[in-house]
Image: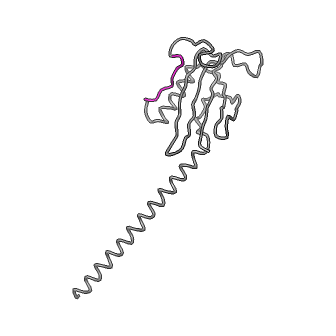
């Protein structure tokens, strides 16, 4: 084999490997772009957190086109419901660092302090926001209150409100 044919073979191999590397690079960039748009599309709906066993949806209200409140009544204690959502937070965040926050931290609050006639509430934030996108569910847990209207009566139950916001 002559020296010239070896050089031609070597230069054609370099071109071939460069083309293959370029095609692989383009495919990787394309997959990244597709992944980004799929991720953005997934954030255009509410981030749903599974409700506890026995939860019954009690109502829903749309605040804006990209937010809503969903209410549940649960025949269980506030402590058990908070423990359930704390476990869900541990699973969501992958650790036990994020905590459900009690308001007030101890005791009971006067009705005007937290905006409604509940003695205390727990807030559990499930944030699923990403690059240039917002998607979260704030879970608010509080003891149900007695009401003369049977449809509004939650005495002896735990009430959970999902405050959901997502990008539109």
From the top left corner, tell me how far across and down residue 118 is, in percent. 63, 16
Q: Quadrant of the C terminus?
A: top right
Residue 29 falls in which quadrant of the image? bottom left
102 within the magenta span: yes
- Residue 7 in magenta? no
Which residue is rendered at x = 69% and y = 35% of the image? 62
Q: How many numbered marks are there?
A: 0
Compared with residue 64, is residue 159 higher up or lower down, i.e. above or below? Answer: above
- In the image, is residue 163 above or below residue 106? below
In the picture, measured across the screen, residue 148 lies left or right of residue 99, that is: right
Image location (x, y in percent) of residue 114: 60, 19
- Near-viewer residue (54 or 96): 96
In the displayed structure, does residue 166 sit left or right of residue 18? right
Write the residue at 48% across / 61% down.
Answer: 30
The residue furthest bottom is 2
In the picture, which quadrant includes the N terminus? Answer: bottom left
Measured from the top left, where is residue 95 in percent x and y? Answer: 43, 33
Which span of residues is magenta-colored?
A: 97-104
Would you place residue 146 above or below residue 87 in this image? above
Residue 93 vs residue 134: left or right?
left
Q: Residue drawn 52% across and 20% down? A: 102
> Can you give x and y, in whole percent of width and height, for residue 116 in the image?
65, 18
**Residue lying farthest to the right in this orientation:** 149
Depth check: 3 or 109 in front? 109
**Coloration of the structure image:** one colour
Q: What type of secondary structure mainly makes up the magenta span?
A: loop
* Residue located at (67% from left, 34% from top): 63
């Amino acid at each position: 084999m002559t020296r010239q044919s070896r050089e031609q073979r070597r230069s054609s191999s370099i071109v071939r490997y460069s083309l293959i590397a370029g095609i692989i690079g383009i495919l990787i960039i394309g997959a990244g772009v597709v992944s980004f748009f799929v991720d953005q599309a997934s954030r255009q709906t509410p981030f749903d957190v599974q409700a506890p066993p026995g939860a019954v949806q009690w109502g829903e209200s749309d605040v804006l086109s990209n937010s809503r409140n969903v209410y549940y009544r649960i025949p269980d204690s506030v402590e058990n419901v908070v423990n359930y959502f704390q476990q869900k937070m541990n699973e969501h965040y992958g650790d036990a660092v994020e905590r459900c926050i009690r308001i007030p931290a101890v005791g009971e609050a006067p009705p005007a302090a937290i905006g409604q006639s509940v003695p205390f509430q727990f807030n559990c934030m499930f944030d699923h926001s990403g690059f240039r996108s917002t998607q979260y569910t704030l879970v608010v847990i509080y003891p149900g209150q007695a009401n003369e209207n049977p449809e509004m009566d939650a005495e002896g139950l735990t009430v959970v409100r999902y405050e959901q916001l997502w990008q539109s």
